[in-house]
Amino acid sequence: MNPQANLIFIISLLLGTTITISSNHWIMAWTGLEINTLAILPLISKSHHPRAIEAATKYFLTQSAASALVLFSSMTNAWYTGQWDITQLTHPTSSLILTSAIAMKLGLVPFHFWFPEVLQGSPLTTGLLLSTIMKLPPIALLYMTSPSLNPTLLTTLAILSTALGGWMGLNQTQIRKVLAFSSISHLGWMAIIIVYNPKLTLLNFYLYAMMTATIFLTLNTIKVLKLSTLMTAWTKIPSLNAMLLLTLLSLAGLPPLTGFLPKWLIIQELTKQDMAPAATLISLLSLLSLFFYLRLAYCTTITLPPHTTNHMKQWRTNKSTNIMIAVLTTMSVMLLPISPMILTIV
C-alpha cells in the first residue's frame, strides 16, 4: 500500500477514536465510530486476497448494523427524554438497544461470530489495531453510560463471552483465531464489572491491549501465523520466544505476572457486590482459555518439533528486536509488584 495512503488511514483511525471518546453528543460519537470503520476497511483488505476482501465485507456489514443501532438507541432516548447527552441515557429501551449495539461492535457473545473470521483474514498489524484501538471507542461509550446499563444483561453477556471465548479457542490451530477468542474471553471480564466499577474495566482494557500488542508484534517479527510454524520458529530469535512464553502466561492471568492484576481486582470487586457465584463461575471459565494459552506457550518454547514436520528449521536472524517490543514485553510481565501505584493513578 502507498505509504501516504497508509498514513491517512492511521491518522483517520486516531481521529475517529479521539472524536468518540471526547464527545458529549451522540451524533459526534456516532461520527467518530463511522470514521473508524471506514479507515480500517482498506487496512483489512490491502492484501487483495479473497479472504481479506471477505473479512472487510463482514466487518463493514456488522459495524454498519451496530452503528445504525447506536443511532436508533440515541434517537429513542432523545424522543422520550429530550436529551442528546451521552451520560443522560436514562430510557430502559434505549439502554437495552445500546448494549446490543456495543456488544456487536466489540464482538461480545452472541454477536461474536464476525470477529474471529475478520481477524483471520487480516494481516497481523491490522489484527493488532482491530483487537486494541478499535475496541476503545465502544468501551468508552459503555464507560460513559455505565450508570444506566442493565447489570443482569451485562453479567449474562460476560459469562457467555468468557465461556464461548474459552470453549471455541480450544480446537484452533490458527494463531489469529486463538487471539480472537482470547479477546472475546477478556471482553467478558470487562463487561461483568462495568456497572459496578467502570475504572476497573478501563484498567483491564489497558493491560489487555498492552499484552495483546506485545504478542502481535512478536508474531509479526518472527512471521508466524500457525501453530505448526510456531514450533519451528524458536531458532529465529530464541530470547524473544522465551519472552513470548511469559507474555502468553501473563495474558492467561497467572500470578505473579501483570495479567493477574485485573482478574484479582475484578474478583475482589464482584465479591464486595455480593456476586460471589458469578465471580466463581467466571474464574472457572477462564481455565478454558488458560488451556489454549498453555498450548501456545508449549508450542513456543517447551516442545521441539517431531522429525516428521513439513517445515524446515528457520535460520537465526541477526535482526535486533524492536525496542518497542522489549518495553511492552517487560511491562506485560513485571507490572504486578507496582500494582498499588497503578491503582492510585487509576
Image (tube, rainbow, N blue to C red):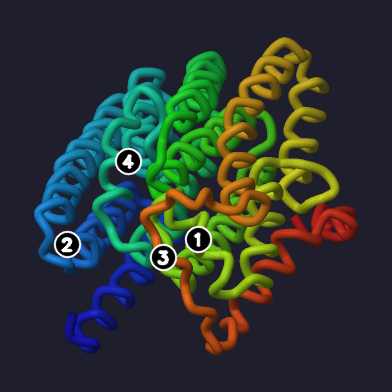
The amino acid sitting under disc 3 is: Met
Cβ atoms under marks 2 and 1 closer than 8 Å: no
Cα–Cα gap, marks 1 and 3: 7 Å
Cβ atoms under marks 4 and 1 closer than 8 Å: no
Residue at 49% across, 42% down: 183
In what quadrant of the picture does the N terminus appear?
bottom left
Q: According to the image, label 1 marks what residue?
A: 232
Secondary element at tag 1? helix
| Label 1 or label 3, whichever comes before in sequence order | 1
Residue at 53% across, 67% down: 218
Using a 10 Å C-alpha cutoff, classify the residue at mark 2 as few (fewer than 14 neighbours), some (14 to 19) or many (20 or more): many
Residue 137 seen in the figure? no
Using a 10 Å C-alpha cutoff, classify the residue at mark 1 as few (fewer than 14 neighbours), some (14 to 19) or many (20 or more): many
The amino acid sitting under disc 4 is: Phe
The amino acid sitting under disc 2 is: Ser
In what quadrant of the picture does the C terminus appear?
bottom right
Residue at 17% across, 67% down: 47
Q: Nearer the viewer, residue 12 or 28?
A: 12
Cβ atoms under marks 1 and 3 closer than 8 Å: yes
Question: Is residue 275 rendered to the left or right of residue 167?
Answer: right
Cα–Cα gap, marks 4 and 1: 28 Å
Vertical side of 71 occupied by 131: above or below: below
Q: According to the image, label 3 marks what residue?
A: 312
Residue 135 seen in the figure? yes
Cα–Cα gap, marks 2 and 3: 30 Å
Q: According to the image, label 2 marks what residue?
A: 45
Which disc number belongs to residue 115? 4
**Of the two numbered discs 3 and 4 in the rendering, the one whose residue sits closer to the viewer:** 3
Cα–Cα gap, marks 3 and 4: 32 Å
| Label 3 or label 4, whichever comes before in sequence order | 4
